[in-house]
Image (spheres, coloured by chain):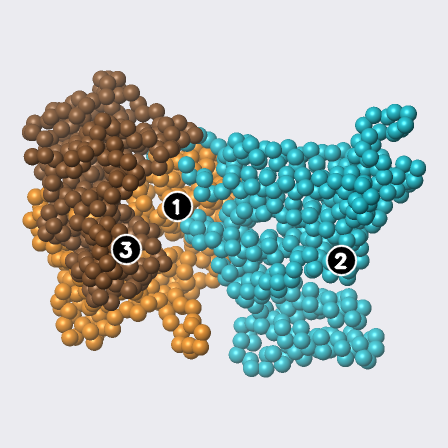
Chain colours: A orange, B brown, C cyan
Amino acid sequence: MNAEQNKLLQVQNLKKYFPVSRQLFSSQRRYVKAVDDVSFDVLEGETLGLVGETGCGKTTVARTILQLYRPTSGQVLFDGVDLASLQENDLRKMRSRMQMIFQDPYASLNPRMTVGAIIAAPLDVHTQLNQKEKRERVQELLKLVGLNPDFVNRYPHEFSGGQRQRIGIARALALNPDLVICDEPISSLDVSIQAQVVNLLEELQNRLGLTYIFVAHDLSMVRHISDRMVVMYLGKVMELADRNEIYLHPLHPYTRALMSAVPIPDPDKARNRKRIILKGDIPSPLNPPQGCNFNTRCPIAAERCFQEDPEYREISPNHWVACHFA
Amino acid sequence: MEPLMRISELHTRFHTQDGTVNAVNGISYAMQPGEVLGVVGESGCGKSVHALSILRLIQIPPGEIDAREIWFGGRDLLKLNDGDIRKVRGREIAMVFQDPMSSLNPVYTVGFQISEALMLHKNMNKQQARERALELLNLVGIPEARKRLDNYPHQFSGGMRQRAMIAMALSCEPKLLIADEPTTALDVTIQAQIIELVVRLQQELGMAVMWITHDLGIVAEMAENINVMYAGFIIERGKAHEIYHQTRHPYTLGLLGSLPRIDEAPGTKLISIPGLPPDLIGLPQGCPFFARCAFREERCRLERPVLEEAGSTGHTVACWRWQEIDAETLRKAVGGAQ
Amino acid sequence: MSTQMPEVEVLTDFAVREHRSLWLDAWRRLKASRTAMLGLVVVAVFLLSAVGAHFFWNYNAKTDLDYSSKLLPPNLVSTAEKPGVHIFGTDKLGRDIFTRVVHGGWNSLRVGLVAVSISLIIGCLLGLFAGFFESFDMNLKEKLVLMCGLGLVLGLFPAWIARQWYQTLLFGGLGAASVILEKKLAYVKLRPVMFAAAGALLGGLSGLLLAPLVGLVCAVVGLLIGLLLNKPVNGKAFSSITMRVMDILLSFPSYLLAIAIVAFLGPGLEKGMIAIGVVGIPVYARLARSAVLSVSQKEYVLASQSVGEGHGRILFKHVLPNILSPIIVQATMGLASAILSAAALGFLGLGAIPPEPEWGAMLGDSYKFLSSGAWWAVLFPGLAIVFSVLGFNLLGDGLRDALDPKMRIN
């Protein structure tokens, strides 16, 4: 990480609690702490990977950054402007600079709209282009993501999953955004198609100087595409470091377990490595454990972990971790 | 040794309004008792359909199963009548599916569902069946199993449900367990637990396991033999080591290349296979992988390659040019195209 | 907006499926279904004959009377002893039943169409907004429109009592003020009192112009309205209030409610349309709301939000087109039941006013003659009802299969 690099996005103590519908006759209001005190920076031009299992809050972080969910507290500074405090109209203007690619290419494209109309939607909202200019821009974008520009009048259901995801990428790029949040863009695609999309994303980043936040549950894919990685568990950040640092010196026991659970496509290595198999299941985010979130499954949990929530601290330059024993 | 199962020239087709879908196109292989076989391929490659065809769980019509034989336990499964094939299902060949939520009935307790299978197949009485169900839940590592017997499926987490499904599958001590993407819906740490469980159970009980998956990484650590499937064909088959280290088919190579490796330094570009799998209605005349292959030549378009022995015994490949193919040339070929 | 976009080679030059819009797909499936096409043909025959008869076949119900030929059985050929061709026979006033069945079709189908349009438009709008604002928070402008509208509607009561129609505008203004002042008055404890007083003043003063007693009544009504308008409703409250009102409407037996409405409005075809239309509103409101709720959860709606599209665009470009299919199916089925309801009202003498031909009324007129053997006077209007209802039901069933989203993927 380079100190001169500009911080494009700063997430500071971000919290997002979802109220759970109150039970009859109970005065206590309960919350799902989907994101609980998360902080990290995203540098201009880098790819920050956000990795974690079900219920870790990675998608909520992504959506809260874009203010699709309004944060419960905390700040999201985009180019120095706090998005959380913006009114709807000002926010809408900012939206042209940050876009999102969604997980499910079947659900994220309106089946009743043509590909041209889908990609042109951001142009309709944010620009004053006329019909012809819009059409040209859409065709340019289709070409950019490797689709035939004559597809403008077609409907999403005529395409395969990988092709649809390309349409989603084209929509995200329509306004030349600075930041693109990729929310599990490949997890519903087949392996060989995943590689196509990841290669396309990398190519586009080089060409257009994009900044990515890449959200996924697949640790090896996140490590492949990211410069730095954030490991999340139950709404909190466990560890943040450079992708090589985190692989060579994982400090958090959860990161270590996650790493060892990733399958290796090599029978010799796979059979000889020592795996850390975590016990039990991920606790429900509705009642997370006392103390450290990970204590129910942690192989090295001690007395202290059940009482004190570990502090999220910078243990060596640019390597952050939340564990008492790091 | 007499094989546990021998499939020869299995075809499964579905007759639909738009035409005939050729889901499985003449696959043949044998499994030994106690063998762990990995079946790998992308969606639509016929890996699940072929497993369902073994148990004749395909709806006919629109489906159609056509094979020389599906030999299992001394008889041809295709020749059994409906009552007899039902006895094979669950008792001799058990299956675990991808979605544990929809495979368990939400209105009965987990304990009841397991003991029901036992009472049906093993003629146990209620008490015996309950005791055995408890043993099974302990075997698959469900904590506080006695309490869990009386829980309903929705009280189980995804991983626990899959364990319960495995317990149910094991209830009649099958000779073959078919696991159809059992970990796809689960998180990695839970996936690791399930893999460890199945490997342990396979060694303890000595049953054969067929593990169907799209992920070459998962089967690497447990499978003895691996079938790689594409468009309803087995395009490469061999010992795990051969599949990963002496890969001969360009598709298998491409699949391996498109997986990012956690154990290697990042930075190399992934190899992507361009294009899409062929439409199973009206397959091309030649090699099914022709349109996406970096090594294609005129012969591949016209003639469909058949499995032939490649180098060592038991390693077979369906490719005309297998001798010229390795990872380096593929990387160059793909890199050159881009 | 133009940037340097370098050219890349086109990777995928083909789409997986043929180019067809979803509507075209649905039409193809509809065409493939024989029963649906049968329904369509039946419906088309009825519609064409009714429209054709209304515009090109003069018939005056008021002067059609011929006592000399009353209750004649069907007669296809005119002969010396049986003069006059009446293919469906004649009724008690000697009117040709065929003529009246065909002309009655115009009335019956019109009732069906208008009634369904009333329930469709009002019901869908209510359901659409209820569902939408349950999923998305209302912004200031929308709250303003809603509270202003609410004030206008509620203001109708005192205005009607005092006959001072400008009052509605005053209450509309009160509703708007409630939204504008929401933040400022958020912590003022006396706010409900302030609004109640304002309401009482607005109602009472204009009432006083008429008479002291009217002023008092209007002041009380105004006070209640003021209390209601005191706190601007949010989307969730709007939705739950709307849906509870729909629940209340639904809890009445539908025919009784229709009869009650007609009894209140007075008989007549137009009143029947309104009655049947009002009774149908909750069905569409519920359907639309649940469809909107499920569509709102779709990722493409989230995507449109992230792009920065406003509520109007999301509602009309993303939500509405995707809830149309179940509503179209329901409307087709609704036509059948509206025709039945119209016939029932007609049979009871609450629909068309007597000489006007209408299938239900024709049944009601003639069933007394069934015992004297005049089966034709009952059979043919009855068959017309049966076949038109059957036609719409078959078509609706076919549409359901054709538009079913589950069939869309393979």
Residue at the far right: name it: C68
Which residue type does callout 3 highlight? Answer: Glu
Residue holding disc 2 = C262
Left or right, residue C172 beside residue C346: left
Q: Residue B95 placed where, x, y %?
A: 24, 46
> Label 3 to label 2, Cα distance in Å?
60 Å
Q: Is residue A267 above or below residue C311?
A: above
Q: Residue C302 placed where, x, y %?
A: 43, 52
Q: Is residue A58 above or below residue A104?
A: below
Q: Residues within 10 Å of mark 3 (few under 14, many from 20)?
A: many
Q: Are marks 1 and 3 on the same chain?
A: no
Residue B306 position by quadrant: top left
Q: Nearer the viewer, residue A79 or A112?
A: A112
Q: Residue A40 placed where, x, y %?
A: 27, 61
Residue holding disc 1 = A172
Q: Chain of mark 3?
A: B
In the image, what residue occupies the spot 29% across and 40% down?
Answer: B83
Which residue type does callout 2 highlight? Answer: Val
Q: Nearer the viewer, residue A73 or A25?
A: A25
Q: Secondary structure beneath disc 1? A: helix
Name the front one of labels 1 and 3. 3
Which residue type does callout 1 highlight? Answer: Ala
Residue holding disc 3 = B116
Q: Residue C287 placed where, x, y %?
A: 55, 53
Q: Is residue B263 above or below residue C266?
A: above
Q: Secondary structure beneath disc 2? A: helix
Name the front one of labels 2 and 1. 2
